[in-house]
Amino acid sequence: MLNWLFGTKQNKSKADTLPPYEESRGIAAKGTVTKRRWLASRKGLQPEILYYFATDKNDSVRQTVAANETTPLQADKILSQDSSDSVRLELARKISRLLPGINIARADKVSQMVLEIINVLAKDKTARVRSIVSEEIKTLTNVPRELVEELAWDAESIVSMPVLEYSPLLSDRHLLEIIRSGIAGGALSAIARRNELSDTLSNAVAEENVEPATIHLLKNATASINAETYEIIASAAQNSSDVLENLIERDDLTLSTIRRVASFVGNAVLSRIIERHKNKPDITEEAFRDIREQIGDRIKKGGADNVAIPGEEARQRAEKLYTDDGLDETVIIRAIDQGERMFVIHSLALLTGFGWENIRDVLNSKTGKTIVALIWKAGLSAKASVQVQSGFSDIPKPDLIMPDEGGGYTFSEEDMEWYLDFFS
């Protein structure tokens, strides 16, 4: 394993054809960027030359050597603090792939160095770098628990979400602390999707009353949801057709929950519930008959026999404006000021081509960078992105992503597409 440390981990039979040593030294010292980049990509290149390339003045050369699997770990350690984001991103992808083979219980030099590098990358100033580490270690059990916990607490949802959803190293106690700290919607949804989610955590998710997270909880067939939690969710369902739709698809509703839902829905919805639960031994035909009578009494007193779909009128209005080329930035900003949330969501869905549910999840995530990327995708200005962050998503002023000095977006198009790909 020490061969790996010193840069000779590559099997010689798989090494690339290399120029003579003296020629390689000449290219490294005085070659063009194209030649240096080509040489830095060669598998089996002498460790000292790869080490030299780790401090090359050209970013693309350092990025190439960061991606080279035969680069010595000493050089990787230097690259982990490189000034270029692209270099550190490439290194994070490569080093993270080494983690499954690491044994943290064995104090060998290679394991120690790989973990040192990963710890540096997990604290990187760029969220994309940290998110790569989180994505790669999310299911591993052979990494330090402290590393996973640090990523789970990350303020950026794209960093915390992978480990929050998958890591077996996060205890219920720790996850409960994170939920109660007031995490963003995307991170809360990640916890809601965890396999075999306990009663305690399901209840904590529901109590936050964040619609996308509640929906993800209901869609999680492995989540354990008790009667108390269902009572919380039923209250949310009274004001959200999305929550209601997912609630009535659950196979484990209690009779008390069904009675609660029947207090505000009509016979059509109740019929769907009965069909799903009619063979359950603890819910009798007599109970369903009694519930139907309650609905009938409510309707006779003037109660509706159906549930209005929230946002339907807003969707239709947005579609008409879009068809008439009248759905512009001024209209959307006015809707934000007037609190027309569903109109804003449907409008952005039309302008971006994304599903309105995705738009809702992004806006509720309180992840400033992704929201900015969404507004950019909609063809609106960077100034409008500030309005959406503050007026719609209630992001605190110190955390707002502001335009650059020229009033434009501060991120590259590549970065914005990356943020959107993560959430889509």
Image (cartoon, rainbow, N blue to C red):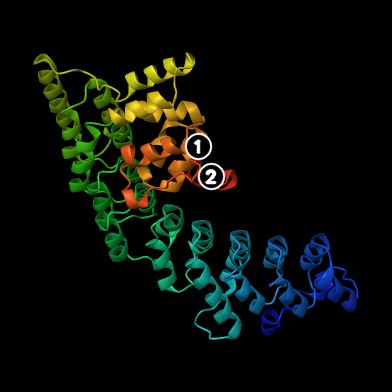
Label count reads 2
Q: Residue at x 40, y 20 (%)?
A: 318
One can see residue 254 in this view: yes
Report if the CB atoms under discs 2 and 1 are less than 8 Å apart.
Answer: yes
SS at mark 1? helix
Mark 1 crowd level (few <14, some 14–19, many ≥20, 10 Å Cα): many
Q: Residue at x 84, y 76 (%)?
A: 25
**Along the line of sight, which residue is nearer the eye, 379 or 312?**
379
The residue to which callout 2 is attached is 416
**Which amino acid type corresponds to the residue marked 2 in the rendered image?**
Met
Specify the label residue 376 is tagged with.
Answer: 1
C-alpha gap between disc 2 and disc 1: 8 Å
Residue type at tag 1: Trp
Q: Is residue 395 above or below residue 59?
A: above
Q: Is residue 250 visible?
A: no
Residue 313 placed where, x, y %?
Answer: 33, 18
Give the vertical position of 257 relative to 64 (above or below). above
